[in-house]
Image: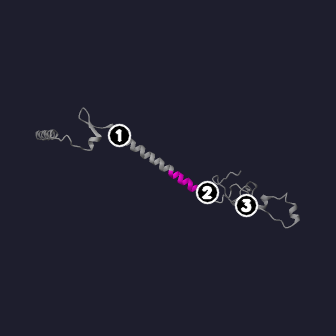
């Protein structure tokens, strides 16, 4: 135990001598970040934390700019794809022209039933694409997920 005490005492003396012989112009990067308080304990300097906060704010702003840039690019791509579609159910004059063979058939034009001619339900007449026939409607098993509101 006494030997251990003597070793520690010698080590303290060597450290004290090294501190006395220290070069005052000596520099270490840790000296920027840390400082000793009145008790001799090492503490971080507040200024260094402020630099980290600025770096985080810069990174966040660059991330937000990237997200905005990707959103603009995706919107342009969606617009381009939408313009290439035929817009089957979109606005426009979609008309069917039915030709009759004789005058007898043309007399009943006012009483002509369009739903019967297309073999579909009257609620589906407004749809210009994917208009199901009555046989398809009877054979199909509808789920709530498949339900489409018809206007």
In the rendered structure, are the residues bearing label 2 and label 3 in contact, judged by CB atoms less than 8 Å apart? Answer: no
The span picked out in magenta is: 69-78
* Crowd band around label 1 with a 10 angstrom C-alpha radius: few (<14), some (14–19), many (20+): few
Q: Earlier in the sequence, mark 1 or mark 3?
A: 1
Question: Which colour style is shown?
Answer: one colour
Please identify, in this view, whether the residue under mark 1 or under mark 3 is nearer the observer.
1
Coordinates of residue 21 in the picture (x, y in percent): 15, 40
Residue 49 disc label = 1
Residue at 86%, 64% in the rendered image: 105
Q: Nearer the viewer, residue 48 or 123?
A: 48
Q: Is residue 81 above or below residue 29?
A: below
Residue at 76%, 55% in the rendered image: 122
Q: Is residue 108 above or below residue 43?
A: below
Q: Earlier in the sequence, mark 2 or mark 1?
A: 1
Mark 3 — residue? 133
Q: Nearer the viewer, residue 70 or 10?
A: 70
Q: Is residue 23 above or below residue 138?
A: above
Q: Earlier in the sequence, mark 2 or mark 3?
A: 2
Please identify, in this view, whether the residue under mark 2 or under mark 3 is nearer the observer.
2
Mark 2 — residue? 82
Q: Circle 3 — which element? A: loop
Name the quadrant containing residue 141: bottom right
How would you classify the magenta stretch by its main secondary structure? helix
Coordinates of residue 145 in the picture (x, y in percent): 63, 53
Q: Is residue 77 magenta?
A: yes
Q: Is residue 85 magenta?
A: no
Marks 2 and 1 sit apart, C-alpha to C-alpha, by 49 Å
């Amino acid at each position: 135990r006494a030997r251990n005490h003597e070793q520690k005492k010698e080590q303290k003396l060597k450290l004290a001598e090294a501190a006395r012989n220290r070069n005052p112009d000596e520099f270490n990067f840790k000296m920027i970040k840390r400082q000793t308080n009145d008790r001799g304990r090492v503490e971080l300097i507040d200024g260094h934390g402020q630099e980290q906060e600025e770096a985080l704010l810069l990174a966040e702003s660059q991330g937000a700019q990237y997200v905005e840039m990707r959103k603009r690019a995706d919107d342009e791509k969606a617009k381009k794809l939408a313009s290439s579609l035929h817009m089957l159910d979109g606005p426009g004059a979609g008309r069917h022209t039915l030709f009759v063979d004789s005058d007898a058939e043309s007399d009943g034009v006012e009483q002509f039933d369009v739903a019967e001619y297309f073999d579909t339900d009257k609620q589906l007449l407004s749809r210009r694409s994917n208009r199901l026939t009555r046989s398809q409607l009877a054979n199909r098993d509808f789920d709530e997920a498949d339900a489409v509101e018809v206007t």
